[in-house]
Structures are given as structure tokens and as C-alpha cells.
Amino acid sequence: MKETILVIDDERPTLKMFTLLLSALNYEVITAENGLEGLNLFKEHHPPLVLTDIKMPVMDGIEVLKEIKKINPMAEVVVITGHGDMDLAIQALNLDATDFINKPLRREALELALSRAGERLAIAKSEMEQIGLEERGDAVIIRVRGNITGNTVPHLAERLAEARRLGRRVILMDFDENSSINGAGITGLTTLLRQCRDADVRVILAGLSDNFRAVFESVGITRLAELFDSQADALDTPGSRSA
């Protein structure tokens, strides 16, 4: 199955060149002639890859990058810069652009940027698979496997948002017995749990090892979510029993 890529550039000859090159590389290509049109197409098609020029009318590439990352933080965005635009390229990288390529376009540079984007997408997919979701009675269960890091937190945020949309009484985060979490993961999890508390969403945690229970207690996570030894114990509490 072909990967879809969105190309945004206000120069039609450049769009045509990208379409020819990317089609030859087996991509399904969507094109837009300005940033606003590109953003609307992104919302409609949700492509995992985006190439965007920086200097454009209506909405420039930096604004496009910011908006795309708000919609989908995991989208890979490669920015297209002109000669001497290094400051803009650095600004884009600081906003989590995958890479930048310079005009005039070189095929080798394009292929290298796309290869980096593909690697990041593969890693993101693997990390996303660590976090599953299922509905059970009045609860939504988020299953957490593997190592929770700063890179995993955006996927966890997506699952929590999905769980909240389902409108159940409680969200249970069930950690595998071999799960671990580093400092960045703890910081991210704390932020997500605080957002849930502020929105009056009940979250309970289960399955943590004794070591991580102690860590969660010491950093104050127990003030944001209840801790249980197992999924069964958590689901047996009032308001979260299975139907």
C-alpha cells in the first residue's frame, strides 16, 4: 500500500516536480498551493508525511508546521527552504520538523529526508502498539506495555483523549508487570493525569511494581489517580465494575 504524502508549495512547477519524483518513489501525492489549503487537506486526509515550503502567501510553512503538530504531533513534516534560510530551518527543527531540504531540490537530499521520516514513523508505530485500548462495562482500559518515555507520552495522550471521548465513568491504566517509566515519562504522565483531574475525569492505575508504586507516591501521582495492585481489584471498585 502506498504511503500518502502532502506537498505544500506556492510554485506550481515545484509542485509538479515533487509529484513526479515522489510518484516514482511510490508515494501517493496530494498537493496544495498555499499553507491554508494544505492545512485543510491535512485535516481531510491525515497523511503521515508532509513536505512544506516555508515562504508562502496566506499561511507560511512555520505556521503550517505548528498547526499540523497541534492536530497530530506524530506527523512527520519536512520543510523546504531557500538558500540562506538557515535561521528558519533551525526554527522549524525546534518545532519538531523532521528535517529540511534546500532549493534547488536535489533528489538525494529528498530521499535522505524521507528515509529519516520513515524511520521516525516506524518507531512511532512501535511505540503506539505498546499502548492498547478496550472498553469494559463502565470503564475504558488503557493497556501499557514496555518502557514509558518522553517519546511515548504523546501516544499515551492520544489514548487518553480517545478514552475520554468514549464517556465512561472511569479510565483504568493497566501496566504490564514488566513496564518501566523514566523521568521524562513520569513528568509527562503527571501532566496528563493533572489534566484529567482538572476535567473531573477519574483515572485509576493498576499493575505497577512495588518500586514504581513507591516512585509514584513520592512524586505525588497518588494525589491525581488511585493505585491498585491489579486490574481485577481496580475494576471491582464502585463506579468501575464491569457490566
Image: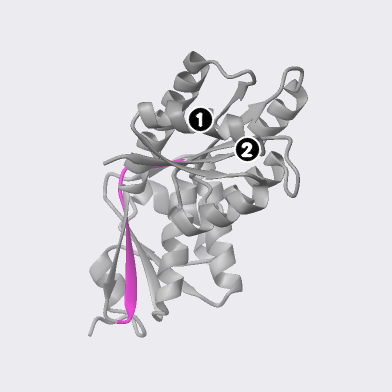
Residue that label 2 marks: 9
Which residue shows up at 32% across the image and 67% down it?
141
Q: On the image, which quarter does residue 14 sit in?
A: top right
Front-most of residues 218 and 135: 135
Is 180 positioned to the left or the right of 189 in the image?
A: left
Task: Give the main secondary structure, helix, strand or loop, of the magenta stretch.
Answer: strand
- The quarter of the picture where the C terminus appears is bottom left
The relative height of residue 11 versus residue 42 in the rendered view (above or below) is above
Indicate the amino acid at tag 2: Asp
Which residue shows up at 40% across the image and 49% down it?
212
Residue 147 lies in the magenta-colored region: yes
Other-residue count near label 1 (Cα within 10 Å), few / some / many at <14 / 14–19 / ≥20: many
Which residue shows up at 59% across the image and 49% down it?
38
- The quarter of the picture where the N terminus appears is top left
Figure disc tally: 2
Residue 25, percent from left and from top: 36, 27
Q: Earlier in the sequence, mark 2 or mark 1?
A: 2
The relative height of residue 21 versus residue 194 in the rendered view (above or below) is above
Is 22 positioned to the left or the right of 78 in the image?
A: left
Q: Are marks 2 and 1 in contact (CB under 8 Å)?
A: yes
Front-most of residues 198 and 214: 198
Front-most of residues 47 and 76: 47
Indicate the amino acid at tag 1: Phe
Residue that label 1 marks: 18
The span from disc 2 to disc 1 (Cα, nearest Å) is 10 Å
Q: Is residue 231 visible?
A: yes
Q: Which residues are magenta?
A: 138-149
